[in-house]
């Protein structure tokens, strides 16, 4: 699958708007400045996913896309484990706590993911005129490549390529880094891309 230049620009703008809302929410929760990268959009062969996600122990809050585009893909808040622990401790008002990851920490990270992804989809829904909703969150602590490969296996049967959106979020103050990852199935992406292209012509 290939994008037209207009579609790619529109998709990047959609990711930028959604991610900016998520970054603002994270900034408010951590009371810290959050840096955000320019959104990347890649068509990725399933066999090459490891090139885009480092194979380290990570914490991921995973949501399936629901609403007007059900089962259209997954949205993932992805943290290296140390960043996840620091974020959870800040959310709970803790200082330089040991880098353990308790049930309370896991609940805090689930809440962070829920608020950030809901904000992302709300902003996207407002732009597209679609009702985009997240599923209940699932917390995964595993090697990144193994976890994402497992998720992709749940997508449309016999799909060789997935569309990967990636936005990097960082807090220099708290030494935190994370990513918003979005894996979209081709049919879902085509529907979104068409809506965006129609909007640019209006």
Image (cartoon, helix red, strand yellow):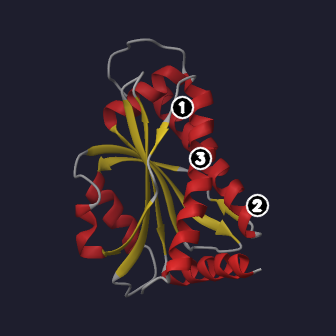
Is label 1 in a helix, a strand or a loop?
A: helix
Tag nearer the camera, 1 or 3: 3
- Quick check: 128 left or right of 164? right
Between the C-alphas of marks 1 and 2, the distance is 27 Å
Residue 180 image offset from top left, x and y in percent: 47, 51
CA neighbours of label 1 inside 10 A, class few (<14), some (14 to 19), many (20+): many
Residue labelled with disc 1: 108
Per the image, the residue denoted by label 2 is 126
Mark 2 surroundings: few (<14), some (14-19) or many (≥20) residues within 10 A: few
**Which residue, given by chain and number where applicable, does mark 3 sit on?**
20
Residue 114 seen in the figure: no
Quarter of the rendering containing residue 131 = bottom right
Say which residue appears at 53% left-offset and 24% top-offset: 32
Which numbered disc flags the more N-terminal residue, 2 or 3? Answer: 3
Q: Tag on residue 120?
A: none
Q: Secondary structure at mark 3?
A: helix
Quarter occupied by residue 98:
top left
Residue depicted at x 36% and y 80%: 161
Give the class, few, some or many, for how many residues have Cα within 10 Å of label 3's Cα (few <14, many ≥20).
Answer: many
Using the image as rendered, state which of residue 135 and residue 50 is in the foreground: 50
Residue 143's x, y, as percent? 26, 50
| Viewer-nearest residue: 167 or 103 | 167
Spatial separation of the CA atoms under disc 1 and disc 3 = 21 Å
At which x and y percent is residue 45?
29, 77
**Residue 138 x/y as whole percent:** 50, 51
Which residue is found at the position 37% from the left and 88% from the top? 158
Contact, mark 2 vs mark 3 (Cβ under 8 Å) = no
Give the mark nearer the N terminus: 1 vs 3.
Answer: 3
Is any part of residue 155 visible from this angle?
A: yes
């Amino acid at each position: 699958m290939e994008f037209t230049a207009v579609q790619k620009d529109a998709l990047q703008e959609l990711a930028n708007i959604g991610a900016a809302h998520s970054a603002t929410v994270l900034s408010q929760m951590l009371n810290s400045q959050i840096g955000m990268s320019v959104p990347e959009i890649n068509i990725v062969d399933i066999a090459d996913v490891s090139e885009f996600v480092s194979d380290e122990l990570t914490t991921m809050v995973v949501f399936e896309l629901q609403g007007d585009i059900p089962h259209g893909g997954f949205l993932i808040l992805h943290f290296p484990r140390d960043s996840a622990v620091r974020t959870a401790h800040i959310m709970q008002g803790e200082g330089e706590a040991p880098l353990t990851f308790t049930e309370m920490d896991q609940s805090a990270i689930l809440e962070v993911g829920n608020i950030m992804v809901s904000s992302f989809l709300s902003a996207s829904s407002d732009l597209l005129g679609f009702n985009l909703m997240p599923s209940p969150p699932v917390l995964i602590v595993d090697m990144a490549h193994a976890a994402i490969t497992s998720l992709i296996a749940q997508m449309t049967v016999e799909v060789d390529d997935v569309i990967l959106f990636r936005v990097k979020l960082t807090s220099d103050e708290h030494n935190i880094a994370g990513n918003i990852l979005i894996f979209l199935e081709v049919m879902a992406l085509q529907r979104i891309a068409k809506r965006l292209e129609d909007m640019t012509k209006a």
